[in-house]
Image (cartoon, grey):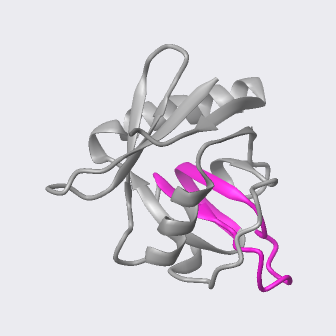
Amino acid sequence: MFIVALIFNANRMAQFKIITADSIQIKFNLYSKDAPITCKAFIQLLPFTKTFFHARVSGQEIWTDDLTPLYIIQENASVFTQPGEVVLGPAAPARVKTVNCLGIYYGEGKGLDAANIFAKVAEEDAEKLKQLGNQVWRKGETSLTFSIID
């Protein structure tokens, strides 16, 4: 099981982190300026637990497709992601194939449809994220718990 928490510090950009059962921490920086509505909506979902799988088509990505529906606009949306970016699919427009999906790219990939790109792994933790992604690739799935740090 993994635990993800948000860290807020007035002197730094907002972050969340994944904590593995092995106590490995992977930090992510929120794109508060590029995707403020998405960041706020994501924060408001916390805490939650979901099962994440390895992507079959979109590349080096772990994802879940049962995120609580978010009725927000598409912002900073693209199929083109950079390694380490985190994406989510808002509930509208309904034609979008990423509706209610949350994905974390640990390497190269391209989404099936546009999703809101709202965070990226902290540079110093990129290798840890690759290791997590490869672990999910080998095992097929993992449970992730997302929560906020008070």
The front one of 20 and 134 is 20
Q: Is residue 72 magenta?
A: no
Left-right relation of 138 to 73 = right
Q: Where is residue 122 in the image (x, y as percent from the top left)?
A: 32, 47
> Is residue 49 something that shows in the picture?
yes
Left-right relation of 114 to 34 = right
Within the image, what quadrant is residue 150 found in? top left
Q: On the rendered image, what quadrant is the N terminus found in?
A: top right
Q: Which residue lies furthest to the right in this view?
A: 95
The front one of 67 and 56 is 67
Within the image, what quadrant is residue 7 found in? top left
Residue in the image at 79% along x and 79% along y: 96
**Extent of the magenta region:** 84-111
Relative vertical location of residue 38 with respect to residue 131 in this rendering, above or below = below
Q: Is residue 87 magenta?
A: yes
Residue in the image at 65% along x and 34% along y: 144
Left-right relation of 31 to 50 = left
> Is residue 35 something that shows in the picture?
no
